[in-house]
Image (cartoon, grey):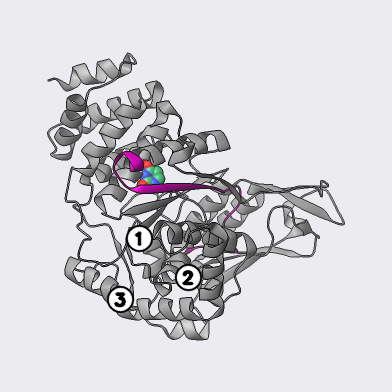
Amino acid sequence: MHVYDIIMKKRNGKALSKEEISYLVDGFTKGEIPDYQMAAFLMAVYFQGMNPEETTKLTMAMADSGERLDLSGIKGIKVDKHSTGGVGDKTSLIIGPILASLGVPVAKMSGRGLGHTGGTIDKLESIKGFQTALPERQFMEQVNRIGLAIVGQTANLAPADKKIYALRDVTATVDNVSLIAASIMSKKLAAGADAIVLDVKTGSGAFMKTLEEARGLAKTMVAIGTMAGRDTTAVITDMNEPLGNAVGNILEVEEAVECLKGRGERRLMEVSETLAAYMLIAAGKAAAIDEAKAMVTESISSGKAFDKFKEFVKAQGGDTGELESGNFERAGLSETVYGRDLQEKPFDNAYLVSCDNQEIGMASLVLGGGRQTKEDVIDLTVGIRLYKHLGDEIKPEEPVAALFANDEGRLREAKARFVKACTLSDNKDFHNQIVYEVITKEDLSGSEK
Ligand code: URA
C-alpha cells in the first residue's frame, strides 16, 4: 500500500477502505508517514468529504491508536459528556457534581482550550492546588469513593487524534464534519463510558456556524456512538454569544460556583440542566426529561451539588477556601465597556442584536486567557465578565462588560476587539434560542445508520 495512492484516491472523491484508513492512521501515529502527506490527505478530506462508513472507520482507527480506558472497575452506568467547543462553556464544572450527587459516576477526561475556545482542564487548574493529572488507580478509586474525577487526557488516549488535531489546527482543516466527529468520538470511545451525551454548539463562536451543519455533525456522532454500542444523545445548543456571564478560567470557576449555589445565569442553567437531564436518563436514573430536570433542580436547591463540588476539588488537592468565600483572585487591571462604546451614532436606548462570538473568544485570548499554540502558557486570572446578553436593552451609560488583565496593552487590544464584535440596533423583537434540538438514534435516517 502507498500513501500517495490513498491521498490521490481521496483527492479524486473516492471512498477509502478500512485497510487504507488504518494504514494511514497507524503510519502517521508511529511517525512513519510525514506531516506533509497527512496534511495533503486532510485537505483532500476537507474538500471531498467522507461517507458515514469511512468516518466510522477513521474514528475506530483513531480510537485504537492507543490504550482504551477500562472503566469496568467503577460501579454503575458511566456517562460521559463532550462539548464541540465554545466560549464561556463551563457546563462540565456544573454537571459533574450534579450527577455525582445523584449517584451517577462521572469519570471524565477533558481537554485544554485551543484558539478562541476554552477547556475544562485549564478552568480547573485556576483553582489553587488543583491536580489534573492523577494515576489511573487513584482516578478510579476517587470515582468509586466520591462519584467524580476529572483529569486531563493521558498521552496514550487516542494519540492519533492528538497528532492529527495539531496538524488540522495549523492547516485550516478543523471545521470538517467527518474530521470533528472522528476526533471527538475516538476520544470518547477510548475513554470507556457506557453512554455519551454530546453538546453540539452552533453559531458564531462554534466550529459549526449553522444549525444545519450542527445537525449533520450531531447525526454523524450519534451514528458512530450507536454503531460502537454506546447509548449516544446529542443536544444542539447556541453559541452565538458566550454561555453565561463569564469568559476566562478563574472567572468561569467563579460562575460555576454561583450556578451550584442556585444563582446561575438563565441560558447557562438551561444548557447545563438539559445536558445533565439527558445524562441522568442515559444512566437509568430517570425515565423522562421533566423528571430528570426536577432531580437536577433538587440537587442544586438542597446544596448537595455544591457540597459535591467542594468534595471533588478537595479530593484533587484544590483549595476550597475561595469556593466558600466567593472571593476569587482576578487579574489586577480592569476596564469597563459601556453602551456608548459600542456605537458611534448617539442613542438613548438600543438592543444588543449580534455579537461575533469567535471575536469575544479572541478578546479573551488577547487578555492572556487562551493559547494560540499548544505550548503557550496562559494567565488563569484574566477574562471577561458580561453584564448584557443578546436581546437586552442597552443604554449609553450602562456597563456592558468588564475586562480583566495583567497588562495595559493587552487590555486595550482586547477592549477594541470586544467593541467591534458587538452590534446594536433598534430592533427590540430579537429572540435568541438556547437549546435547538435533541438528536438520538431514532432520528437517524437509513443512510446515517
Ligand atoms: N473538539 C475536538 O475534540 N475535536 C475537534 O475536531 C473539534 C472540537
Count neighbours of disc 3 (C-alpha within 10 A) and say few if under 14, some if 14 to 19, many if 20 or more.
Answer: many
Amino acid carrying label 1: it is Val
Give the residue at mark 3.
316
Callout 2 secondary element: helix
**Residue 331 visible somewhere in the drawing:** no
Q: Which mark is residue 377?
A: 1
Answer with left or right where residue 350 lies relative to residue 149. Answer: right
**Residue 139 visible somewhere in the drawing:** yes
**Alpha carbon distance from label 2 to label 1:** 19 Å
- CB atoms of marks 3 and 1 within 8 Å: no
Give the residue at mark 2.
253
Q: Which residues are magenta?
A: 225-248
Q: Position of residue 306 (x, y in %)?
A: 47, 78
Q: Nearer the viewer, residue 364 or 306?
A: 306
Q: Nearer the viewer, residue 84 or 401?
A: 84
Q: Is label 3 or label 1 in front?
A: 3
Q: Earlier in the sequence, mark 3 or mark 2?
A: 2
Q: Split into 4 quadrants, where in the image is the C terminus? A: top left
